[in-house]
Image (spheres, rainbow, N blue to C red):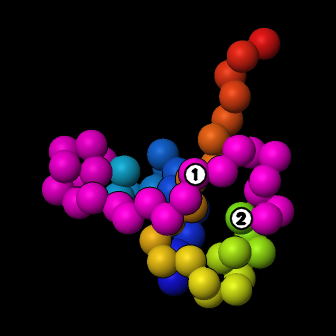
Amino acid sequence: MPGIITSQGGNHELSLHQQIKPIIADRLPLQAAAHAHELLESSNVRGQLVLLCDHQS
C-alpha cells in the first residue's frame, strides 16, 4: 500500500545508500495533506506521496 515517506522509516537508510529507489507518485505542499490522504485512501496512487515543507520564515 502506498504511504508517506518519512526520515524515521526503516527504508531511509537503504535509500541513502541507493540500495532501493522509492517510486514518487507526486510531491504536494504540506497544505495539501488532506488531499494527499484522500488520494491514498482512493487507492489511485501508485508510489509514494511526498509532502513538501516550506522552511522560509
Q: Residue at x 28, y 51 (%)?
A: 15
Residue 43 placement: quadrant: bottom right
Q: Which of 47/9 is in front? A: 47
Mark 2 and 1 residues: CB-CB less than 8 Å, in contact?
A: no
Vertical position of residue 47 compared to residue 44: above or below: above
Disc 1 on helix, strand or loop? Answer: strand
Q: Amino acid at mark 2?
A: Ala
- Tell me if 28 is positioned left or right of 33 in this view: left
Residue at coordinates 71% horizontally, 82% vertically from top-left?
A: 41
Q: Nearer the viewer, residue 6 or 31?
A: 31
Find disc 1 in the rendering and name its residue: 27
Which residue is identified by label 2? 36
**Where residue 50 sits: x, y (%)?**
57, 53
Q: Which stretch is magenta?
A: 13-35
Instruction: Identify which residue is drawn at 38% across, 65% down.
Output: 23
Q: Amino acid at mark 1?
A: Arg
Question: Percent position (x, y) of residue 40?
Answer: 66, 76
- Count the numbered circles shown: 2
Rendered view: 55 above or below 16: above
Which quadrant of the rendered structure holds the C terminus? top right
